[in-house]
Image (spheres, rainbow, N blue to C red):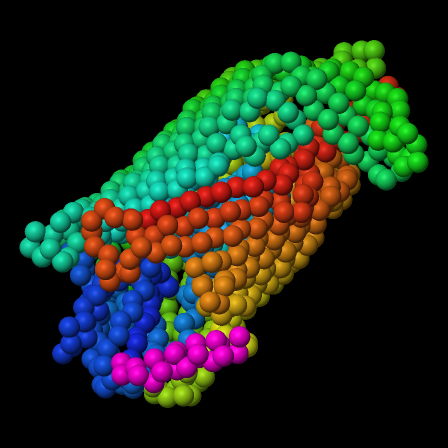
Amino acid sequence: MAVFATAIFLCFSTDAFAQSYASVRGKIRDRYNHAVDSIEIRVEGEQILLTTDSSGTFSFETSPGKKRISFRDVRSMIRYHIAVREVILSAADKKYLSVIMSEFELLVEIGDNADDPTGLPDRPAFQILPIDPKEVRNMPSPKIDIESKLEMMGAIKNNELSSQYRVRGGNFDENLIYVNDVEIYRPFLIRSGQQEGLGFVNPNLADVVAFSTGGFESRYGDKMSSVLDVKYKSPYKFHGSAEVGLISANFHLEGSSVNKSDSSQPGRFSYLLAARRFAIRYVLNSLDVSGNYQPDFHDVQGLFAYEFNNRLKVSFLYNVASNKYRFIPETRETSFGTVQTVLRLRVAFEGRELTEYLTALGALTLEHKPSSKLRFKYIFTGFGSRESEVFDVEGGYWLSDVNTNFGNEGFNEVVFDRGVGTNFRHARNYLEARVLAMEQRGEWFPGQSFKHHISWGLRAQNQVISDEITEWNGVDSAGYFEIVEHIRSQLRLDNYQYKAFIQDQWSVNGKGSNRIIAGSRAVYNTLNGQFFMSPRVQFVYDPSSAQAPTDLESEEYRKWEKRRYQLRIATGLYHQPAFYREMRAHDGSLNTSIAAQTSAHFMCGGDYRFEAWGRPFKFYGELYYKYLDNLIPFEIDNVRVRYYPNNPGIGYAYGIDLRVNGEFIRNVDSWMSLGLLNTKEDITGDGQGYVNRPTNQLFTFAMYFQDELPINPTYKVHVNFVYGSGLHIGPPGSLVNRTAFTAPAYNRVDLGFSKLISFRSIEEYNDRLAIQSFWISVEIFNLFQRSNTVSYTWIKDVYNTQFAVPNFLSARLLNVRMIGTF
């Protein structure tokens, strides 16, 4: 064995000594840390010419010596000036270049480092966490959208079947999602994760994904908790992928037209096309309720763009999603309680459920660049949703005590029935929603110093919602029949909102390392006549930049680059005017006069880049406090949020978020995040003072860990681990007791094994339709068979005592996915 190892070592050593060339690799980003594609890289005097793809990365090999490298934007709508850098390379040298190019000025900043950074660059704005879409596709999870992976980035989720998430004490409705500056909406009537389908953002189309958990800028809209900002790709050559799995199938194409004047350059027209199908019948069959599940979600999404010249560009983003959930329940058996007292609920069902959601979004965007310092964007958006809930379900139930005596022959068998009854659920609910919006945005760099970056926007929005509700729930138990809830109403909402924002980002010193971002939003709501302003300020302080050595080739610069840190503070007001669900009470009535909810953010944080075990890492930390006013109380049942719009209140939330990412295993990025939270509210008229909010989750921890075989890195292991302490729950329809009890903690581990097969190198790859790589993954969901509780069914016994019967999420399952790229 020793002889074999020595032989291998000598082979590699001989090869290393024989090298007479130097290798150069790196990544190109813009001033907002977005990857930049279509940048031509040329080494003067040599036959080296390459162009960056959507990831902005590049690599090449060249002879030793002094090299002059140029970076040039090759798109028809040029955004960056030509930049040139000289580097000195030695034989067998390995150089990493980090290139930052500017859109509006003749500027390029290039730093070099022997090691590739972790992939999370310094952020110019407050608490914007970049997310690599490629990593999202690798994570083992039942859902393959971007939204369901945000629990690794500071969001909170307690339902692997849902794409909805909570941030710092807020609920699902308090989060903004943008794709190419277009605000994204979701269906209104979804009750459970089983019915939901996939989130909007398609990882195959995403280029840059950034997530902010608070303190975000004025250019983002009117929600209280978070913003997910996604930029789709601008493809310059043909590429595609196809994925098949036990629960999902995906297909995407991207490319551009032929440039007749220069075939080596992309044409003026580019396209993105994608289709997804998500059918989780295999997963749902592991739930407590057995029956005939027929879920079917599929969507088609795309982005078309045409550049008339270097000043004018038009694009069209569209999405059509169809989601049908058919379910014929048959039986259910759930055991719960303590070691000494175990109860068992057995249910026999009759009837069926049918929910359908059809949503469509289209957005036409016109970009005009009159000069190198001025840019305009005009966005016309239309969104429509047609939704229906039809169900008639009768469930006869037996609530029984179970024998817990291990030495008894009747162990784990029913001793006696303490409750027998029947639940009746009936609904005929139909909702149609339409949102139309017109928006104008602009960017301007005044003066010659480029220290100021002024942004503004104007938006007019109309939302029309028609909702027909016929729903009742009844219980036949303990000798009597009781109607628990009855709703019958026809509602129509027609509302106009006018919005505007302006902000300035300016550099405090010449290097731009210390920045202030100050601005404000203004909103007028015609439905209740409310007008409000939302001022917001962020300050980024980079003390390490003043210590930067001027010689980029020196060892001092390399050491400085590995030990950078930044500090940030932010404050501002975040108003959230009621959209629709916040206005609707439990009896089906609308409170249209309700004022916008308000959150005042106070945050302080920073990040620190360091080395450990000779590998790069980055640490993030943030303290926050949020004062909440005009709160609309709510309760959560699975993913359904039901509001009490007639009982506003006040509240607060404070906590700390910590996160570290880096190469725990060399050349493989992993990360861990930890959150501590305390959020409470005081509801007017309930006589209780401050109580826990339904989203008060004291402790959360998430980890994504990767490893690979050292002798063959194409074999990888991916581990997701999520833990969240118990949420506060209570019986439905009770404002006072909404959070009287605490649910069990959420604990889940997903494991994946993957193998990547590459059929040809990038240099050999051309535009022919040929398979470039093949990726296969075997995944084990819920590895430790954790029975996580998502909600409760409330049952009464003969003594009129109410019991909370847990509804569990999915059990351990095996999944297989295969992805081919071409």
Q: Residue at x 49, y 77 (%)?
A: 5
Whether 381 is drawn above or below 590: the answer is below
Does the segment drawn in magenta span residue 3? yes
Q: Is residue 69 left or right of residue 630?
A: left
Q: Is residue 326 left or right of residue 558?
A: right
Farthest left residue in view: 261
Q: Which residues are magenta?
A: 1-21
Give the image location of residue 788, x and y in percent.
68, 41
Give the image location of residue 579, x and y in percent.
49, 35
Report the predominant secondary structure element of the magenta stretch.
helix
Whether 493 is drawn above or below 184: the answer is above
Question: In the rendered image, which quarter is residue 12 located in?
Answer: bottom left
Give the image location of residue 125, x and y in percent.
43, 63
Q: Is residue 28 left or right of residue 813?
A: left
Q: Residue at x 31, y 62 (%)?
A: 56
- Please give the count of numbered marks on the rendered protein: 0
Whether 572 is drawn above or below 89: the answer is above
Question: In the rendered image, which quarter is residue 588 located in?
Answer: top right
Question: In the rendered image, which quarter is residue 36 located in?
Answer: bottom left
Q: Residue at x 72, y 20 (%)?
A: 347
Give the image location of residue 83, x and y in percent.
22, 73
Does the segment drawn in magenta span residue 94? no
The foreground one among 698 and 683 is 698
